[in-house]
Amino acid sequence: MQRARLVLLLSLGVVQCGGEDRDLPPGWTGARSLPVDQSSCAGEAIMPGAGKLALAREMGRLRASYEEAPFRCQQRVCAYHLGDGAGGARVLVQPCDMTPDSVAKCSCLYRVGFDVAGVEPGRPVELHRRSDRYGAASEPQPELVASVRAP
């Protein structure tokens, strides 16, 4: 019964990224894939902005929520964690498919949730986002969305 629930939860939007197809930018070598849960589209991303980061301790774990994360409609995102936790952490959220053949002609705001293991209270968690390569004149670079101290 427990196994069936886990399979059901995984099929409802929890994504584990990684494997050989990881497509990370320079400076992110060694980043570990994080399981993410991504909401459905919560509105059109009309105004420019990269969203915001909220952190909370839940039962001993640090839970991060990337609110109003602007990505393309129907675009699955992945998250990667870099850092040892003692000095803080950097997290990159980007499309799982960085080189799509085609894309939806709209953008959405999502909530992307993930756990950040080992970050001590008071240490910074930096959230970076990167867009895909579709239509880009140059290689998309990670942009800093927020830096928040862990509770």
Image (cartoon, grey):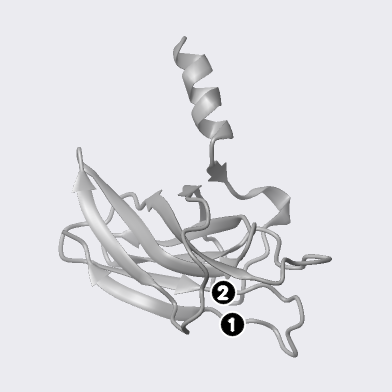
Q: Which residue is mark 2?
A: 130
Mark 1 and mark 2 in contact (Cβ < 8 Å)?
yes
Q: Is residue 52 left or right of residue 45?
A: left
Residue drawn at 37 percent across, 63 percent down: 67
Q: Position of residue 73 (x, y in %)?
A: 63, 63
Q: Is residue 96 left or right of residue 99?
A: left
Give the vertical position of 118 relative to 14 (above or below).
Answer: below
Task: Residue type at mark 1: give it.
Answer: Gln
Q: Quadrant of residue 11?
A: top right
Q: Position of residue 40 (x, y in %)?
A: 52, 51
- Local SS, label 1: loop
> Which residue is most to the top?
1
> Which residue is most to the bottom?
137
Q: Which residue is mark 1?
A: 141
Q: Quadrant of residue 61?
A: top left
Residue drawn at 59 percent across, 49 percent down: 17
Q: Position of residue 135 (x, y in %)?
A: 77, 82
Q: Quadrant of residue 132?
A: bottom right
The CA span between labels 2 and 1 is 6 Å
- Local SS, label 2: loop
Task: Residue type at mark 2: give it.
Answer: Arg
Residue drawn at 41 percent across, 67 percent down: 68
Q: Which mark is residue 66?
A: none
> Which quarter of the rendering shows the C terminus?
bottom left
